[in-house]
Amino acid sequence: MKLFRRDLHSLSGAYALDALAHGAESERFARHLNRCSSCSSEVREFREVATAMAFAAATEPPPELRDRVLAAATLTRQLPPEVTSHARPRRARGRARARVPWLPWLSGVVATAAVVVAVLFGYAQAHTEQELNQARAQNQAIAAVLSAPQVKLLSQATTKGGVATVVLAADRHQMVVTTNGLPALPTGKVYQLWLIGTTRTVSAGLLPAATSGRTGPVLASGVVKGDTLGLTVEPAPGTAHPTTTSILVLPLPV
Amino acid sequence: MNPSDSDASRFRSVPTDRRGERDLDDLLVHVARGDQVAFETLYDRLAGPVYGVIRRVLKDPSQSEEVAQEVLLEVWRTAARFDPALGGAATWVMTIAHRRAIDRVRSTIAAAEREHKMAQIDTPHDEVAEAVEASLDAERVQRCLGGLTEIQREAITLAYYGGHSYRQVAELLNVTLGAVKTRIRDGLIRMRDCLGVS
């Protein structure tokens, strides 16, 4: 038994370098770590050595990675500080509506996409099976835009405050638009996006209702060279042509 | 960054002796609250080592970029789960990065081996070595690696940069499993002391 323990202990280095086999072996060592404080502090120190080795290998990533990561972050919901368990806090009882359990879907939805887009806003707001399916399809399309080989991240303040952020996949002629901090609208009014071209102006969709000041991603297709993104306030449920002055004029480099 | 911020000041008390590390801890706390500016700064500080270590393991540039993107987004998504009591922010992020690279290697072992060979032709090692030599971190690490026995150094670099399991390392170096475990651990202890990790 003693030999076995010592044997296990000597795995600390391999464990810290992720060199144990996945599954039983590394799980057994992880369990051992919980009981062995000298092992866990040793692993912690070894991980710092590994961190120094990672810094020593630092390599400038391709510049488009930055845009893509930052754009994806604007669309990715963050996890709350504590690990959520199945038990719900008692005070939540009043609001019985369960949050949509999104994590299990995530892997399926974006398994092939390069981006892990953790819950796009649609999920939390969807309440029927049909809405959920729509949200899933929409998220797949959005994930596809985000994982396009060439994306541009554009961001611009509107004349009424708030910022619109656009992830543009020029080769797909698609873009994803989110906003943050736009002024709230009175009932019966909506924000509508427009693609303003030299020969036509078409609706690019309505912004969904904001959650903590942010609006979820809107996917727009058919972006062509020379298009400018516009944003107007229109009577619900939107209009065929803009009827007010655009509060955003953002040229789209396609 | 904000002195009136009680959460942030909680993390101030964390002792850190590696340069810049404490700033990173603070940054990560802000990232956890959805601060996109903090995330941009964090990206600028950590994307190089994240991409670099993944690239070392995977070799293939486009796969490396893909995994780096997943890792950096995971940092954004799970920033609130970072526990400074378990180590600094840089270590947290690099642990995720290395683990993801390993996951990728092991999940697509056949494909990886194929690309491995191709990438080795595409990317002369000198290029990597040059980039490595440019930084201070690299100099320190190289010096400390230089202080190891040859077998310790090879075992550690094959495991960490090569992404090999210690069983594979044993095969590659033609030594027993027990010897590899011990060499890696002894080598890391020497590295720890040489790098001044407390």
Image (cartoon, rainbow, N blue to C red):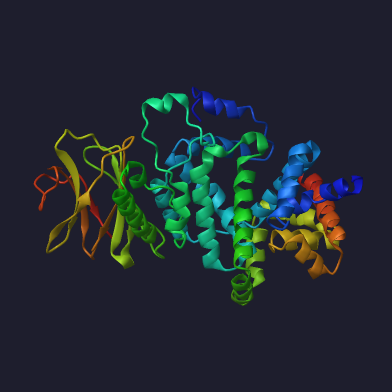
Q: Residue at x 61, y 59 (%)?
A: B103
Exactly how many numbered labels are in the figure?
Answer: 0
Q: Is residue A131 above or below residue A182?
A: below
Q: Residue at x 67, y 60 (%)?
A: B133
Left or right of residue A85, residue A238 in this image: left
Between A246 and A130, the residue placed more toward the observer is: A130
Residue closest to the far right: A2
Q: Is residue B86 above or below residue B127?
A: above
Between A89 and A254, the residue placed more toward the observer is: A89
Quarter of image, res A224: bottom left
Q: Position of residue A97 (x, y in %)?
A: 36, 34
Between B31 and A156, the residue placed more toward the observer is: B31
Q: Position of residue A68 (x, y in %)?
A: 42, 56
Between B110 and A162, the residue placed more toward the observer is: B110
Quarter of the image for the C terminus of chain B: give it.
top right
Q: Residue at x 60, y 64 (%)?
A: B107
Q: Is residue A16 visible?
A: no
Q: Residue at x 81, y 65 (%)?
A: B170
Left or right of residue B178, residue B64 in this image: left
Q: Is residue B51 visible?
A: yes
Q: Position of residue A13 (x, y in %)?
A: 78, 51
